[in-house]
Image (cartoon, rainbow, N blue to C red):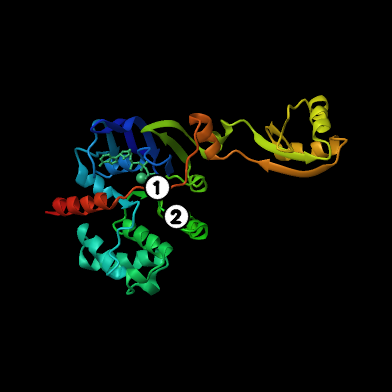
Amino acid sequence: MSIITVNNLTKTFKTLTAVDDISFSVNEGEVFGFLGPNGAGKTTTINILCTLLSSTAGAASIAGNDCAQNPDEVRTAIGIIFQDTTLDTGLTAYENLKFHAYLYNLDRALTERRIDEMLNVVELQSRKHDLIKNFSGGMKRRLEIARGLLHYPRVLFLDEPTIGLDPQTRNTIWDFINTLRKKEKITVFMTTHYMEEAENCDRIAIMDHGRIIAMDTPGRLKEMVHGDVITLVTSDNELARMELQKTFGVEARVENGALSLEAEKGDELIPRLIHGLSVTTLSVGLKKPTLNDVFLRLTGRTIRDEGPRDNKEVTREFVRSHRRAQR
Ligand SMILES: Nc1ncnc2c1ncn2[C@@H]1O[C@H](COP(=O)(O)OP(=O)(O)OP(=O)(O)O)[C@@H](O)[C@H]1O
Ligand SMILES: [Mg+2]
């Protein structure tokens, strides 16, 4: 059952086509990710889905509600964690959550209950009355996730959920999202340009210049890149190259003092190579294809791990439009 449906969605800004005729659907309970370099159109797509931006052409719907025709219903169904932090650092965790509950019209008793519930979920109950300016980056992100979940959305949008965080905090946040997802049966739509992060998704759409250039499970996407890359350094690389060809039927290249060859199942081939060669093996390397290799194969370029675009203006617009919707 699909909970997000996007058909031929296009967004142009003057002469720039930021989102170019994309179509996809996301199943209920799925973790779906957009992976792509800076400016690929990931945030623009999220902003259309979250009713913050109108599309130029095409349609999108969430939980059966058209994003352009029924924005209020869509907003009730979603939670969003923006690319840049949008917490008020001069307020406490509790006050930030309370403000959000107010935007969503939760009554007073329910607000108090949900705040405690969500602070427990993100393990910040003990910091309830602490000012945000004293929180670490990871704690801020967890609080934003709690805030995004406060009104029990069916779909949680995470735009670069762990941007700027260290790898350890990134892993903690992902453990947490995965646990949450099992408990709450929530659908997660996320964007990232971190390869390892994209590995957490059930399916990934690879985006480039506003277009979806591939969409599948991380495993199947990586199968597009043929095999693993094995590097060998031996006591006689040229002799080893000839033996590899004769005995194993594999073509190896000698580059920078090492042999390099591609194989379907590198981990199984390596022991056989070492035993089969008459020369001594001095070192062995095995590189499994990454999503970056997939992107490279598709575009001839790599996804650079750069900082994101400023999103504060979009956030302000979200708050403004919420207020308008509440009136
Ligand atoms: N309000 C706007 N006006 C004009 N151009 C815009 C606007 N918003 C986005 N763009 C442009 O649209 C393109 C896509 O931007 P978008 O923010 O969607 O990319 P992104 O994939 O989220 O990138 P990043 O990884 O840097 O966050 C970019 O070229 C950007 O400059
Ligand atoms: Mg973005």
Within-10-Å neighbours for mark 1: few <14, some 14–19, many 20+: many
State the residue position of label 2.
177
Amino acid residing under circle 1? Val
The quarter of the displayed image where residue 140 is located:
bottom left
Q: Which residue is drawn at the image coordinates 33% and 35% (left, top)?
A: 5
The residue identified by callout 1 is 188
Q: Please say if 175 is above or below 45.
A: below
- Whether residues under marks 2 and 1 lie with C-beta atoms below 8 angstroms apart, the answer is yes
Q: Quadrant of residue 208?
A: top left
- Secondary structure type for disc 1: strand
Front-most of 264 and 36?
36
Residue 308 makes an appearance in the image: yes
The CB of the residue at mark 1 lies under 8 Å from ligand 2: no
Residue 1 visible in the displayed image: no
Q: CA distance from mark 2 to mark 1?
A: 9 Å
| Residue 29 on image: x %, y % | 41, 45
